[in-house]
């Protein structure tokens, strides 16, 4: 089932997409629900990022490395993205005036469906509402390890518009740990990988994060990016495609002077 957050009839709503039609949600989005009455067609709504203001956006860092590194660390790297970074399918990524180099990072992301604290690896996937495509835009010059505040002040991850997310959530995702992910820059494939290559799989990431902080319904975890990171420029078009979910499409524009 595809769940979308969108603007329709001057109201922000959640709904279910069936083919080209948008239906209301009957029931509780974070409980038991089903498609309700038909509202309109997909072309009549403006899709929004499937994360509500106020929910946490949690990033997993450097998660496509040899599995051997697991013995060297207690878990994956974790950082936060700014809530103002979340933008929707087709919304523009703003290239900041103070950024000398900006890169893309195509990723699989998920939205938490129920409160989770110290959740076990075996139970972690039961906490997921749905999965989506994400692009963790980063300004590397502000994420240097020479920064004494690196562990708590990952500045290169905090810029507005730097977390494109969408276009919707897929609840019937067959296997998040064996999904084909591709990022295209101006139509050219730059990243092509499977989530099976992740150092820590999806349920391990959820469990690890839940040991650090309580996860609430609507919180987002983005599971890191495979190799192939390159700079972007204003005028570029970026697409993140994950089989079984869809395509997230975003242009890049320069920040207004």
Image (tube, rainbow, N blue to C red):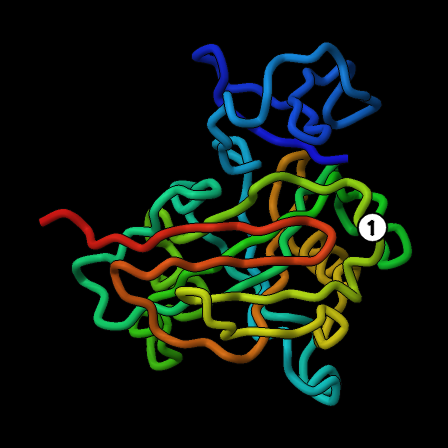
Residue 169, position as x, y percentages in the image: 67, 40
Number of numbered discs visible in the structure rendering:
1
Q: Residue 87 occupies which quadrant of the picture?
A: top left
Residue 173, position as x, y percentages in the image: 79, 49
Question: Image point 71% across, 61% down: which residue?
Answer: 205
* Residue 64, percent from left and from top: 64, 77
Q: Residue 198 vs residue 138: left or right?
A: right
Q: Residue at x 85, y 59 (%)?
A: 121
Residue 118 appearing in the image:
yes
Q: Nearer the viewer, residue 46 or 225?
A: 46
Pointer 1 residue: 125
Is 63 rendered above or below residue 152? below
Camera-side residue of 151 and 76: 76
Q: Residue 148, image x and y in percent? A: 35, 74
Q: Is residue 215 left or right of residue 80?
A: right
Which residue is painted at 62% across and 23% down in the image?
A: 14
């Amino acid at each position: 089932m595809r769940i979308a957050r969108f603007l329709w009839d001057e109201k922000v709503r959640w709904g279910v997409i069936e083919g080209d039609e948008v239906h209301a949600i009957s029931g509780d989005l974070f409980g038991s629900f089903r498609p309700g009455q038909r509202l309109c067609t997909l072309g009549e709504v403006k899709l929004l990022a499937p994360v509500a203001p106020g929910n946490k956006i949690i990033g997993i860092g450097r998660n496509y490395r040899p599995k051997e590194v697991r013995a060297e660390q207690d878990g994956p790297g974790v950082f936060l993205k700014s809530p103002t970074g979340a933008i929707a399918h087709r919304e523009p990524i703003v290239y900041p005036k103070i950024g000398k180099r900006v890169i893309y990072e195509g990723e699989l992301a998920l939205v938490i469906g129920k409160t989770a604290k110290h959740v076990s690896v075996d139970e972690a996937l039961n906490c997921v509402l749905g999965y989506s495509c994400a692009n963790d835009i980063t300004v590397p010059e502000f994420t240097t390890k020479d920064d004494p505040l690196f562990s708590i002040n990952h500045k290169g991850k905090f810029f507005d518009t730097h977390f494109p997310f969408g276009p919707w959530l897929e609840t019937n995702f067959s296997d998040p740990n064996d999904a084909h992910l591709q990022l295209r820059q101006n139509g050219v494939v730059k990243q092509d990988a499977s989530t099976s290559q992740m150092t820590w799989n999806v349920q391990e990431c959820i469990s690890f994060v839940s040991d650090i902080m309580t996860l609430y319904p609507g919180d987002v975890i983005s599971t890191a990016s495979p190799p192939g990171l390159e700079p972007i420029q204003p005028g570029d078009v970026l697409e993140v495609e994950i089989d079984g979910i869809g395509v997230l499409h975003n242009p890049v524009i320069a920040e207004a002077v």
